[in-house]
Amino acid sequence: FARVRVDGQMLALDDVPKLDKNKAHTVEAVVDRLVAGDAVRSRLTDSIELALKLGEGLIRVQSVRPDGKEREELFSEKNACPDCSISFEELKPRSFSFNSPYGACPVCSGLGAQLVFDEERVVPDRSLSLAEGAILPWRRGGFRMVVYYKHLLKAVAAAYDIDMDAPYEELPETFRQVLLHGSGEEPVPLRFWMRGAWRKTEKPFEGVLPSLVRRYSESEIDEVREKLRQFMSSQACPACRGARLRPESRACTVAGRSIVDVMAMTVKQSVAFFEGLTVTPAEERVVAEVLKEIRRRLKFLSDVGLGYLSLERESSTLSGGEMQRIRLATQIGSGLVGVLYVLDEPTIGLHPRDNERLINMLHQLQRRGNTVVIVEHDEEMIRSADYIVDLGPGAGRQGGEVVYQGDLKGLLASGRSQTAEYLSGRRRIEVPAERVKPGKARITITGASENNLKNIDVEIPLGCFVCVTGVSGSGKSTLVSDILKRHLFRALYGSKERPGAFKKITGVELLDKVIEIDQSPIGRTPRSNPVTYTGAFSPIRELFAATAAAKVRGYKPGRFSFNVKGGRCEVCKGDGMRCLEMHFLPDVYVTCEQCNGLRYNKETLEIRYGGKNISDVLDMTVDDALDFFQSLPLIANKLRTLSEVGLGYVRLGQSSTTLSGGEAQRIKLAAELSKRATGKTLYLLDEPTTGLHFADVHKLMELLLRLRESGNTVVVIEHNLDVIKCADHIIDLGPGGGDEGGQLVVAGPPDKVAACPASCTGQFLKRWF
């Protein structure tokens, strides 16, 4: 090289002066100097390649225009900015995954949220004063710690001239900010009682929340951290704002949209985005196959009725039916043939409008040469089947037989099948001749705007059977579960769960109890069973303790419980089964060899009532036990409700882990029916017909109407038309799902909804009205 540039001055190599070694200098080699034009294109290319090689990817280009204006630019072949010092590695597919350390936000590790101390949990009751313990974490702990914080609060309040007896909500906002977040660097005059004397000091006040953060981070004791965690809540990560990705990944765009923008779209919106995406011929060669695959997979998701789901939706928030349809879309996209597909109630959570689309997708699988086996109760799905296997004739011990197998025409002519009775119309759930007319008492939700709800106002008449309807994703669960239920649980039970966004809810004072009856298990251990859940086991144990043989031996009711020591088998702890740990394999349960699964020891089983010991009673079905205890109203009344809800076939001691979701829900309903009605109870049910046969739905409707007849209010989220047509009042949301939903389409009795042309639910109700 002939020239260099030293500290911005162009010099020949021979003319470079001696440089001061105590100062920083910029020394640059001048690779080439040339006049721009087509003739120098080859030389320019060679010079740039040489400069990039020697400069390790960085070159500086100085240009002089004909008018004498100079311009200097720095170019880099690295992903780096020389001005702001930002650099990043080459972007690869893993860079756009929050499950990979190369793409995850470094602050929240790709979770999108952080646990932070929440003011609402730190000060749960704003009506309390500081003297009464408004700061909840500071009134718990050891005696010395509580006393210290009490004196500290007094000192801070005195420094700001605050009354310790004033309610927290009436304290000045400026003082509340200092109290919670600290005084920063500003010193606060504090006066402490220490070692028998008052001592003064001036230092910055740390603040309640920073002190909790410090204690949480410094503590190595799990119990302390667990106690502090109750004052924390999950909030969006301040760095990525819930996007979960690194800033470099979020900055990359396609057609002006980042991957965060695309993931926030619904399936339907993303289909439109990728279908409308235009690329250049050069880009087409690179992304053609990728785009084809994206469009194909998104179309399958849309075809199975999931167009309302956003792509970023967490799998933990999906219903069982939604998860099943996602897996179905995956299989349809795989293009396999000769496969046996087994589906368990794929219509769960699906509006009748979407059923036809799902049935077409299943026929598409079948036409490819696959076999599709479906466990289903939906009428349209049964009617569309090529071959039907009907089991029964009853449930439990009364079932287990093949009642019919063949095509639909043969099933409808079958005389033993309960399914045929309802499909043929010989039996049906009738439309009520009279309905309860809504009165003035009602719960009014104003300005509901959580998720996709469009700032709607909804009235729920009390003392009625109310159905909340709408297509999948229209906002039903958001309205009932996220807003109404959480607000009522907060108001009546002091729940810490934060309700969804709304302006006002009135009428809460008209209720004294809110009960959610869902399909979750009634217990998670083998010891929980129907007879313990409904409360019938206590009088049964008292009955055995009252026998002459038990009195002679001094046995109390606890002797006949398998949950406490005394009468139970101690080898299996009253489970009747023993768990064998297989270490790297799933645990294996075997019948206890000591009691042979009877749960009790030999002495307890010697006590009999009516010729039966306690284990024999637990092995009875509900119907058998009802006959056995018919002379004892205290026991018989509780068992009768179980029989009335269609669970006469269930054994009294049947483990809750073996019960289906529908059976667990009906046990909960039976427990409620056996209680004395207050007339001011609100019952909330989310799709209670899931997993229920036509006959079971019939019994369920009778139960729900019985709850309403006691003056209570029943609110049901439902797609089943047999339930909807029996409602006193319908709240129909929609008209579509996702962004197309969230509006109140129509509200009123079923005939009004059936007459509304904008209501998808109404179009299917027309056949009855």
Image (tube, rainbow, N blue to C red):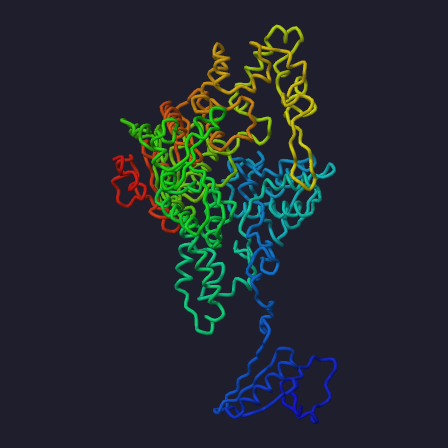
Task: Indicate the quadrant where residue 658 lies.
Answer: top right
Task: Indicate the quadrant where residue 280 lies.
Answer: bottom left
User: Which of these two is toward me, 226 or 122?
Assistant: 226
Residue 363 in the image: x percent, y percent? 40, 48
Residue 434 in the image: x percent, y percent? 27, 26
Residue 768 located left or right of residue 674? left
Vertical side of 93 occupied by 43: above or below: below
Residue 111 located left or right of residue 631? right
User: Which of these two is toward me, 422 or 8?
Assistant: 422
Vertical side of 677 occupied by 145: above or below: below
Query: In the image, what residue occupies the spot 43% across and 53% down?
Result: 300
User: Which of these two is toward me, 262 or 177?
Assistant: 262
Query: In the image, what residue occupies the spot 44% across and 56% down?
Result: 298
Residue 132 located left or right of residue 698? right
Inspect this view and state whether residue 713 appears. no
Residue 652 located left or right of residue 206? left
Quadrant occupied by the N terminus: bottom right
User: Which of these two is toward me, 314 or 142?
Assistant: 314
Residue 350 in the image: x percent, y percent? 40, 42
